[in-house]
């Protein structure tokens, strides 16, 4: 349980530090993914990988400890690697298509994994997801960005409740 606490604190810390840094350095963007372009142009693409791999994929897959969440984290890690807005990997159009499919697939698989882990906690924490959908429906400013933020918060809240408080 101590390792779970450490990994969740690590995940939250890495994600918040990354978001604070990129927003202060590059201004507000429409989604978290759009920061990869300016970071690449400034030779700081490694920060995107630290955020995706060390902030999200590995800690959340480890704490969730389910085969579906591991597959989801793998999808997200590979999506970040191959579509990290590096012009040597793919042409821009294909980057966007693969990125959207990869991220939505990873999120969908992770959500399914949460219901397999503990469907009661998943249902109880789902209002965060509903709130994110409300943002999208209302077309509020930076709705994609806020959906991504609320999804991360939902994951953290779910894992704190299920893997720390209920274990």
Image (cartoon, helix red, strand yellow):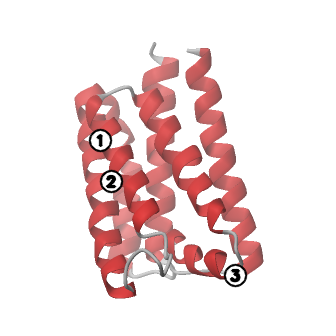
**Which residue is at the far front?**
88
Q: Residue at x 48, y 69 (%)?
A: 84
> In the image, is 144 to the left or to the right of 35?
left
Residue 66 in picture, x, y percent from top left: 31, 28
Which residue position holds label 3?
27
CA–CA distance between discs 1 and 2? 11 Å
> Circle 3 — which element?
loop
Which label's residue is closer to the chain start, 3 or 2?
3
Q: Earlier in the sequence, mark 3 or mark 1?
A: 3
Q: Nearer the viewer, mark 1 or mark 2?
A: 1
Task: Provide the residue designation for mark 2.
Answer: 107
Total numbered badges shown on the rendered structure: 3
Q: Quadrant of residue 45?
A: bottom right
Q: Nearer the viewer, mark 3 or mark 1?
A: 1
Q: Where's the N terminus, which quadrant?
A: top right
Residue at numbered disc 1: 71
Q: Residues within 10 Å of mark 1 (few under 14, many from 20)?
A: some
Task: Please give left or right for residue 33 compared with residue 120 in the image.
Answer: right
Label 3, label 2: how far apart the Cα atoms are:
26 Å
Q: Is residue 92 above or below residue 108?
A: below
Observer-nearest residue: 131 or 14? 14
Of the image marks 1 and 2, the number of the one nearer the N terminus:
1
Q: Is residue 79 above or below residue 113?
A: below
Circles 3, 2 touching at the beta carbon (< 8 Å): no
């Amino acid at each position: 349980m101590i390792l779970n606490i450490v990994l969740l604190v690590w995940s939250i810390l890495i994600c918040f530090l990354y978001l604070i840094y990129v927003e202060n350095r590059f201004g507000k963007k429409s989604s978290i993914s759009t920061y990869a372009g300016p970071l690449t142009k400034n030779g700081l693409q490694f920060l995107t990988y630290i955020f995706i791999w060390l902030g999200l994929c590995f800690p959340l897959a480890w704490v969730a400890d389910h085969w579906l969440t591991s597959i989801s984290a793998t999808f997200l890690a590979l999506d970040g690697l191959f579509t990290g807005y590096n012009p040597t990997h793919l042409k821009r159009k294909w980057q966007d298509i693969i990125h959207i499919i990869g991220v939505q697939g990873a999120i969908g698989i992770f959500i399914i994994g949460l219901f397999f882990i503990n469907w009661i906690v998943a249902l109880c924490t789902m209002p965060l997801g509903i709130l994110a959908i409300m943002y999208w429906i209302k077309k509020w400013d930076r709705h994609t960005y806020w959906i991504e933020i609320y999804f991360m918060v939902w994951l953290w809240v779910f894992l704190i409740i299920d893997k720390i408080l209920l274990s």
